[in-house]
Image (cartoon, coloured by chain):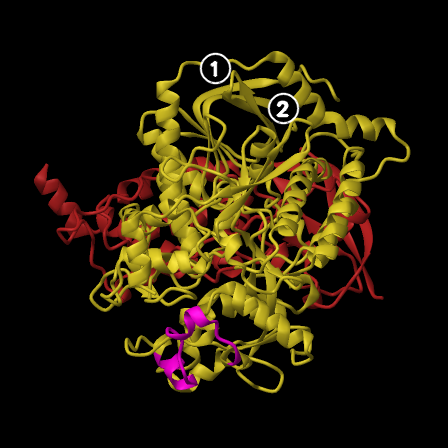
Amino acid sequence: MADTETNLQTHEHDVIVIGAGGAGLRAAIEASAAGASVGLVCKSLLGKAHTVMAEGGMAAAMAHVDDRDSWKVHFADTMRGGQYLNNWRMAELHAKEAPDRVRELEAWGAVFDRTKDGRILQRNFGGHRYPRLAHVGDRTGLEMIRTLQDHGVHQGFKVYMEHTISKIFVDGGRVAGALGYDRERGFLRVFKAKAIVMATGGVGRAYKITSNSWEYTGDGQALAYEAGADLMDMEFVQFHPTGMVWPPSVKGILVTEGVRGEGGVLRNKDGKRFMFDDIPDNYKAQTADSEEEGWKYTQGDKNSRRPPELLTRDHVARKIMKEVREGRGSPHGGVFLDVAWTKARVPGGAEHIKKKLPSMYHQFKQLADIDITEVAMEVGPTTHYIMGGIRVDGDTQMSTVPGLFAAGECAAGLHGANRLGGNSLSDLLVFGKRAGEYAAKFAKERGAVGIDESQIATASRAALAPFERGAAGADAEGPYKIQYELQDLMQDNVGIVRTEAEMKKALDGIQGLKQRAAKVAVGGNREYNPGWHTALDLSSMLICAEVIAMCAIERKESRGGHFRDDHPSKDPAFEKFNLVVRKGMGGRPELRREPIPAMRDDLKQVVEENK
Amino acid sequence: MATATFRIWRGERGKGEFKDYETKVDEGMVVLDAVHQIQAEQANDLAVRWNCKAGKCGSCSAEVNGMPKLMCMTRLSDLPLDKPVMVQPMHTFPPIRDLVTDVSWNYRVKAEIKPFKPRPPDAPDGTWRMQQEDIERVQEFRKCIECFLCQDVCHVLRDHHKHDEFIGPRFMVHVAALEMHPLDTEDRVPALKEKYGAGYCNITKCCTKVCPESITITDNAIIPLKERVVDRYYDPIQKLLRIGRK
C-alpha cells in the first residue's frame, strides 16, 4: 500500500497552475495564449472552486453608472480600505486593468446585468465611493468561473481534476515541479515544470465559523512557505460581517454584502440602526447623515452619501460583535439584517428583492425556513478571506522563489489590512492574467529543470506516511479531531477581537497539535479517502495558523482586519512596514518587519485628491 | 438527543452494500451534515464529494430516499426519520467509491459543444450593448451549477444509457444558453439534430423537477431547441426551398 514506486506517473509542462478558481483559470488561459504547455491542477472538479461562492460582483471603474468614477478613485478607495499597508503598485495595476478584464469576460460569453443603455450594470458595495461592481444578480462568482471554464477548455491546457499537491520541488535555486496525488485512485504523481503558479485561495477552514469550503486549507501559502517563499500580512484575516447564524449547521454561510447594497439595514434587538452610532473619522465625509440619505444612495442618487452599513467589512463586523457582546443581539447571537423593509419603497416590492437577490432568497428559504422579503435575517461575522499570503512582485506576481508565482487570495499585497468587497474577483482576473503571462515568459526564457530523485522519494514517503502509521499503530489518532481542535483554537483565540495572552495560548496549542498531526494515522485504502486527504491538509492549516498567530502577536496595534483588545488604536509606527515570515534555517518560522517602499509621487497625489 | 439512521451505500466500483449508521440529529441539519458527522465519528474513509455546502457549487449530488438531491440542501426535517434515510450515489454515472461517481463524461460532452462566438463589438471601444430583457432567458440558463442531477434523472441516460447519442438536459440547457445569447453567431442547429440528440428527449420533464436552481429546463431550453431543429429540417416550405436551391 505504501509502495512509493508503483504508479508514479510523471507529467511535464512548461507551467503548472495549482488551483482552478478565477485566478488559476485566468492564469492558465494566459499562459496557454503565450504558447506555453500548461497543466492546471485542481483539488475538486473543474468549476467547483470557491470562486463559485462569490456573490456581489467584481469591482472595476468602468463608470457606467456614475461617470465620476475612474481608476484613480478606485485606487484611492482600495488604499484607504487597506489602511495603506497595500502594495501600492498592485493597487494601481488592479484599478487600471480591472475594466479590461471585465470586458474580456463579456467577450468570452459572460452575461452581466445591464444598464438602461445596454452596458454592464454596476452596483454599490462597502468602501467603494461609486457604484462599481459588475454583477449578475447575487451569483457573480458562478458567472465568472463558468465563463472562464467554458472558454478555458478550448485553449489547449490540460486539466488534472481532483488532484492535490503536497510538495513543491526546488532544484538549483528555482522551482522544478511538484508532487501530488489523484483523489480517485490515490496514485502519486510528479509534475515537472519550469514555472508554477499558486492560485489555491485562502485558509478559512482553520476557523470554526467560516464561509469557506473544505478546500480552503491554506495549501498554497504552506507549500510556498515550505519551498522557501516569504509570506506577508498573514495577521490580516477578514471576518465578513454577515454570515448566517441559524440553524447551527449553516452557521457561517455567507450573506452577500449585496443585501446592504440593495438597501438592507442592520438593526439590533431593539430595532435600532446601530451603525449610525460610530463612524470612523476617515469615512465621515463620505457617510450619510440620515437613514433617508443612505436609502437614496442605495437607489442611485448621486447627491447622497452611503449608509453606514456600507462601511468597510472590518468595521461593520466589529460593530456587530459589540452589539452581541453587550446584549443587544438577536435570539441566536447575531443581529438583524432587514431587506424586507425596502418592499414598500421599490416598485415590484417582494418580487424586486427576489430578482436582485435570488440566491439569498433561495438560501434562507431552503436552509432556514425564512422568507427574506417578509422578515429580517439573523446574521453575524464569519471567517471569509485572508488578505495576507505569498509575498509577490507587484508586476510579475513572482514570489521570492524564482519560478514560483502566486495570484488571487493566496497572494498578498493588493488588499493591505482589509479587502474591499468586490476587489477579490477583479484581483483574480487582473493578477491571474499577469501571473500566467509572466510564468510563461519565465518558462520560455529558462532551460529544462531536473528534480532530484531523492526529493521525490522523501516527499512520496511523507504523503503516504499516514497509511503506514494506520497499519502499524494501535494508539493512532485520526485527523478529524485535530482539525476540529485547531478550528476551535483559532476561532476562540485568533478571531475578530484579539489579545496577546489568548494568541500565545493559541501558539502553544498549535505546537501541541503539530506534534499530534505528525503522528496522525488513517485507515482504508488510497482510493478517494477523505481521512487521508484531511491528514495531509492538516499540515497546511497548521503552518498557516502558526504564521497568522505569530504575526498577529507582533502587530501591537489595531488596523483593518486585525483588532487587538490590548492595543485598540492604530499606531502610525506600524504603518511603515509589513510583517513577513519565512522558514528559517532550523525549520522554524522567522518573522521580520519589511519596510513599505515609498509611494510614487503621482500616486500620493491621487490619494490626496481623493481624501 | 434525537438520533436517526442513515443507510449509506459503501462500496468500490459498483461492488458494495448499504450500511446503517446511527447518528444524532440537531435542528436545521441537512443530509450532508449527517454524512459528515458519520465520516468524522464512525467512518473516516467514507467518500463524499462536496465543496460549498450552500447549494452553489453542485458537488454533493446523490440520491436521498431515491430522489436526486443536493445533500447540502436537503433538510432532515423534510424527511421521515422514523425509518432509515437511504443515501446512495447517482445512478447514471460509473461509481467510484461510496457516494462518489465518475462524472467526467459530462466534461467530455461539454468540450465537444461549439463554444461562444460573439458578433463584432457594437461600440468602438470593443464593447457590446444588450438590453436586460433580452438576456433574462439566457441568465436563467446560466444559473446552472452543474450538479448533473438532471443528467442523473434523465431516463435516456439513466435507463437507456444513450450517453454516446444524447448530451442530456444539462447540455441542452448549455446549448440553449449559447443559441439564445444575443451576441452569439455560431450555428448549433445541425449538431443538435445529428450529434447532440435533441430528438431523444420525450419531454417527461423529470429534469425540470429535480433542478435545484429551478431552471425550467424542458419548457424554456429543450422545447425551443427542438423547435429550431424542426423549423430547419422538417418545415415543408423550407424543405422545398432547399430542394429548389440544390
Between residue A606 and residue A410, name the one nearer to us. A606
Label the red chain with its letter: B
Instruction: Judge the density around disc 2: few (<14), some (14-19), many (≥20) Cα neighbours within 10 Å.
Output: many
Position of residue A401 in the picture relative to residue A508 (left or right): left
Position of residue A575 in the picture relative to residue A453 (left or right): left
Q: Is residue A440 visible?
A: yes
* In the image, farthest residue toward the front: A573
List x then y, in percent, for residue B115: 31, 41
Badge 2 is on which residue?
A188
- The mark nearer the N terminus, 1 or 2, is 2
Residue at mark 1 to residue at mark 2: CA–CA distance? 20 Å
List x then y, in percent, for residue A541: 66, 42
* Residue segment shown in magenta: A277-296
List x then y, in percent, for residue A153: 39, 36
Q: Is residue A145 above or below residue A12?
A: below
Position of residue A127 in the picture relative to residue A569 (left or right): left
Q: Is residue B137 above or below residue A287?
A: above
Instruction: Give the drawing colour for chain A.
Output: yellow
The kind of residue on which mark 2 rests is Leu
Badge 1 is on which residue?
A449
